[in-house]
Image: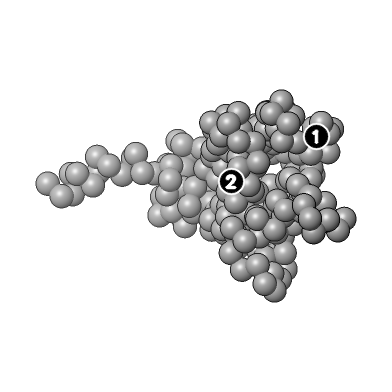
Amino acid sequence: MTRQTKRRRRPDARPEEILAAALTVFSAKGFSAARVEDIAREAGLSKGAVYLYFPSKEAMLNGLVEQSAGQLAQAAEQLVAQGAPQDPEAAFRALLDMLFTAMGDPGVNAAPRLVFAEAARFPEIAAFYRTHVIEIARRSLRALLAAGVATGAFRDVDSDAFMRSVAGPGIAHMALTSIFALPPDHLNTPADMADAIADILLHGLKPRDPAT
């Protein structure tokens, strides 16, 4: 009975197993050098079994993107939709906290790093990432900015500049911590880093009047 139960459940688990194997192989060999045979071997499956679920390496990388950055973008959109109309600044700070927590997590940032490395050579991968991650994030940040302007919490600024100002620190944090092994000297938690970045973005670099 145990073996029968395992056989019934295994096909449902195979996409997850294949994606986990693909991430291992992509991370070790790079996307271009990885072969479907390598991924099948890592997953303990035949090459044909892999093709039943994913027709190509690109499809596997897209699946990894949906698992990680795609889910993050959707969660960010939901956070903004729920929180921004009531308190745009709190939603902004929560959004940065979510971003820095995710970008510092190797389980989340591995797929985006692969996309960044390969997007120039594989335009279809870049297009998928733009649709399933960047456009959702862009829409969310525009909604956040609009809510802040409407309530008087934010001044009206260019939405594309705002998006780059928010996304840039997250990407830099991912690169510095995950690629260059350069963690922050003092801000050792994602929440602390997010709060510090939020403070800079909200108030700028000019000295404040102590009275305010």
Residue under numbered circle 2: 94
- Give neighbour class at mark 1: few <14, some 14-19, many 20+ (Cα, 10 Å): few
Residue 123, image quadrant? top right
Q: Looking at the image, how many numbered discs can be counted on the residues?
A: 2
Query: Which residue occupies the extreme right position in the image?
Result: 206
Residue 26: x and y in percent read 60, 55
Q: Earlier in the sequence, mark 1 or mark 2?
A: 2
Disc number lying in front (1 or 2) = 1
Q: Mark 2 Cα within 10 Å, few/some/many (few <14, many 20+)?
A: some
Q: Nearer the viewer, residue 144 or 49?
A: 144
Image location of residue 13, percent across then percent down:
36, 44
Residue at the farthest left position = 1
Residue 155's disc number: 1
* Residue 200, picture quadrant: bottom right
Q: Amino acid at mark 2?
A: Ala
Tell me the residue at 58%/31% (across/down).
86
